[in-house]
Image (spheres, rainbow, N blue to C red):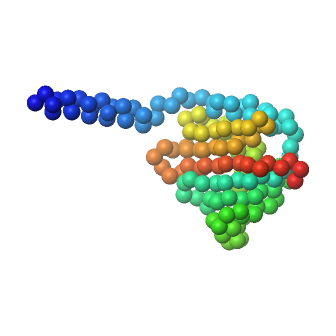
Amino acid sequence: MRRATKRWAVGAVVLVATLGGCSGTEQPGPVPGAAEAAERWTGGGVDSYAFSLTSSCGERLLVGSYRVTVTDGAVTAVEGLDEVGRRIAGEAQDLAAQVPTIDTLLDRVVDADASTVPEATFDDAGVPTAVTFDPSPGIDDEECYTVADVDPAA
């Protein structure tokens, strides 16, 4: 009988620990480092640039890898880099309206509550190198982005 009681107690502790990790008790507030990253990026004065964007997660149109050109703050060209990106770009979708600029990503991260942005990393220039948005945990609405190869000369 003692063995069954110990197993039950251990099982209860494991269950409580597991559920505690899913309780949604993340502290509300700003995403750490986001405001400073946005200041660094804005301080650089870059309005025209190109970058590589990989978009994943969630059920949405914009998935795949792309080379994005931004001119005067607006997306002006989107080229698919992988099979998925080339297919979506080839379907005559208006990807310029779907693809975020670096400024747009930074604005979203700065305006977001930390509990809805489980991942946000920034480089020395303020570029968000990896960002995950998850506005409603439990719903497949995540947006995951990685940004690389930023070329301000574009």
x then y, percent, for residue 32: 64, 30
Residue at image location 20% in from the left, 29% down from the top: 6
- With respect to residue 98, does 142 lie above or below? above
Q: Quadrant of the N terminus?
A: top left
Q: Residue 10, position in %: x, y?
A: 26, 31
The reply, left or right, for residue 139 in relation to residue 50 is: left
In terms of image quadrants, where is residue 83? bottom right
Q: Quadrant of residue 78?
A: bottom right
Q: Quick check: 51 left or right of 138?
A: right
- Measured as percent of width and height from the top left, residue 122 is found at 70, 37
Residue drawn where x is 47% and y is 30% of the image: 25
Check the image and name the residue furthest to the front. Answer: 3
Residue at 71% across, 62% down: 81
- Pinpoint residue 126: horizontal percent, then vertical percent: 76, 37
Q: Could you say which quadrant of the image residue 95 lies in?
A: bottom right
Query: Which residue is most to the bottom?
Result: 91
Badge count: 0
Q: Is residue 101 above or below residue 9?
A: below
Residue sitting nearer the eye, 100 or 68: 68
Above-or-below relation of 102 to 27: below
At horizontal 63% and vertical 32% (from top left) the residue drawn is 31
| Residue 93 in view (yes/no) | no
From where the camera sits, is residue 145 visible?
A: yes
Q: Is residue 123 left or right of residue 48?
A: left
